[in-house]
Image (cartoon, coloured by chain):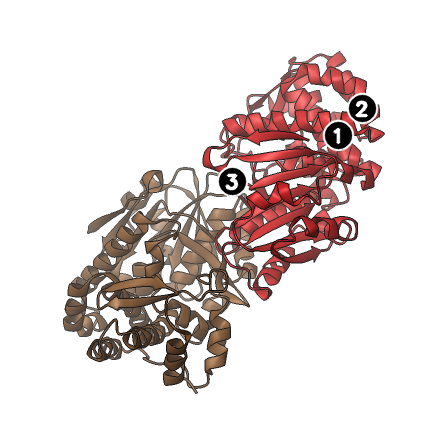
Chain colours: A brown, B red
Amino acid sequence: MKTLSVDLGERSYPIFIGRGLLGNPELVTPYVRGKQVCIVTNETVAPLYLEKVKTAFAGFKTDSVILPDGESFKTLETLNLIFDGLLKNKHNRTTTLVALGGGVIGDMTGFAAACYQRGVDFIQIPTTLLSQVDSSVGGKTGVNHALGKNMIGAFHQPNCVVIDTDTLTTLPAAELSAGLAEVIKYGLIYDKPFIGWLEQNVAAIRNNDPETLAYAIEKSCSTKAEIVGQDEKETGVRALLNLGHTFGHAIETSQGYGNWLHGEAVAAGTMMAADLSARLGWITAEEVARTEAMFVAAGLPIAPPASMTAEEFKSLMAVDKKVLDGNLRLVLLSALGAAVVTSDFPMTALDQTLQHFLK
Amino acid sequence: MKTLSVDLGERSYPIFIGRGLLGNPELVTPYVRGKQVCIVTNETVAPLYLEKVKTAFAGFKTDSVILPDGESFKTLETLNLIFDGLLKNKHNRTTTLVALGGGVIGDMTGFAAACYQRGVDFIQIPTTLLSQVDSSVGGKTGVNHALGKNMIGAFHQPNCVVIDTDTLTTLPAAELSAGLAEVIKYGLIYDKPFIGWLEQNVAAIRNNDPETLAYAIEKSCSTKAEIVGQDEKETGVRALLNLGHTFGHAIETSQGYGNWLHGEAVAAGTMMAADLSARLGWITAEEVARTEAMFVAAGLPIAPPASMTAEEFKSLMAVDKKVLDGNLRLVLLSALGAAVVTSDFPMTALDQTLQHFLK
């Protein structure tokens, strides 16, 4: 087992990465402050892992809330089901919520923990590659709104994160690929050598090789932890983590949440960002091709859905959280392995990118 | 005009108290960081003051959201109407929300500001006595849940608070009385001389005398600011502000939110807390009678609704946020003008209090 530390002053917490960690009380017990625990999971994950996780919390009064599965349920309405469960079982301010599932469960459980009685503790047990490498680090929580993804939420850090790589053996191949989109992202924005490692190891990851997976997760989490440690509330460098996300969110909003997986939308969005970066002369056409080949090898899309138009894209991007006073700010690649947040690009270049990918 | 300061480190903010402040751009402009403002108010207050407040924000792109009026609308569902308005009008992370109305508007707007894009600025313009002396200080925001009042929320401090005492001239008499319940509370828990002042001045307050009102508001806000400054997140002394609230919340939950005004429930709840305090020998029967006389003079109830039973009370109090690991903790009067949070009382004494007031 590896232990990483996310350093955020008094809100610091450990991430445990390894095999067979789910049912281990020794890992989680030190991070439960009170006597009550509420495990929040979904209909897909519950039959696989809920009983095992309950054994880790056997020393506590443990309840569970089982939500419907899918990004389309990441709403205020579903959030209320968590509050229903907590109140019916009389959970008080010292309760600990446990998020058992993917990013949707993690984001909603974290947000429920941020708001329940104005803030209670929570522990993350992410069971998808995407949530292990992305949403388990950094404390971003929230739900979607019909008019925009993740528009309602809070910053709320977990007490600890338990990543059991064995959970990935039950993950559908498309979801493993979706997680790889974020893994590749860390290379693209921050770590050129990791790009080379990934090019060599994408196949082993897709074949669920535990050692390779553990390294990819550890590397991703430590990169994210390093960035978040510098900028917890995303006033600066943290925004780089959103490479491909402004384009990607437009795809997700347009297609209806959950029809494109988040990682798929990020992959296509990253290709759009790479295309624009190349038009600005910041990366070469060869580097764009190398990026594209990696996404293809990872089993990911490299373009937005054919049904979308450039007009639709621009309108959806205008409500993105990175829009400041009407200026569209994008994360672009300043080189392969380095990124910038910028609104300093000609609109004609963006138009050319949109026209390249869309009708 | 008086200016009070709520000292909370980097989250400190001023409270302006005086007549004719609503339309004054000089007070609020320094506290707006971006270019967008969204005024949130309700159907009762909008026709009275919305246009005037808009003039104070004339230099900004100003939108407004008008909610239905009443505690029964203090829900996640109504909260979503604020998010609808913000997203439809493309408000970004630098927007400022303005709460124009009573405690319900203040709590919901503050919570919307805490959650919108994971946190934006807000300004409070409370227009009821209750919200001026209570919810405008301290940063508690939130909504109700069918199973418990204020169960979902966040701590989120305003950038500034503008209290225009002229707004009280349009306030119904019952709501002025409800506000007085909290004013009286500050005397009971913290300030014996203020109890004497109130006994002399309740009539003038109910007659809307501006000078007397301004003094009562200033005194209440400064007492609350002093307590909140010592304990922003309510881990200690701040809990004293909840005198009468555990009993009071049980009344509000039982009667359906909004059928008893919050201040009315607090008054009846405070009488129950006073009765229990007397049974424990901490205050005299004479002091209970003095407390009762003050509430009567303020036009407030001194007992819970006759329809409630002791059993119902105990069950509703068990989900209160102050219940820690099954121990019921109550704010009681350790003397007239001083309070404690305690679970150190015999259950039989509580039963006697409940039987005294209920069938």
Q: Which mark is residue B202?
A: 2
Give the x, y percent position of residue A207: 20, 73
Q: Which mark is residue B180?
A: 1
Q: Residues within 10 Å of mark 2 (few under 14, many from 20)?
A: many
Looking at this view, is A93 or B85 the one in front?
B85
Same chain? Circles 3 and 1:
no
Three-letter code for the amino acid on which mark 2 is drawn:
Val
Residue identified by numbered label 3? A92
Q: Which mark is residue B234?
A: none
Three-letter code for the amino acid on which mark 3 is drawn:
Asn
Give the x, y percent position of residue A149: 48, 65
Pointer 2 indicates a residue of which chain? B
Q: Which quarter of the rendering shows the N terminus of chain B? A: top right
Give the x, y percent position of residue B357: 76, 28
Q: Residue at x 66, y 19 (%)?
A: B277
Does residue B170 appear to the left or right of A53 in the view shown? right
Tell whether label 2 touches label 3 (CB within 8 Å): no
Pointer 3 indicates a residue of which chain? A
Give the x, y percent position of residue B281: 65, 12
Looking at this view, is A291 or B334 the one in front?
A291
Q: Residue at x 34, y 41 (%)?
A: A31
Q: Residues within 10 Å of mark 1 (few under 14, many from 20)?
A: many
Q: Residues within 10 Å of mark 3 (few under 14, many from 20)?
A: many
Label 1 residue SS:
helix
Three-letter code for the amino acid on which mark 1 is drawn:
Leu
In the displayed structure, would residue A340 be above or below residue B122? below
Residue A51 appears in the picture as rendered: yes
Q: Quadrant of residue A135?
A: bottom left
Tell whether label 1 touches label 2 (CB within 8 Å): yes
Same chain? Circles 2 and 1:
yes
Q: Quadrant of residue A96?
A: top left
**Separation (CA) of disc 2 from disc 1:** 8 Å
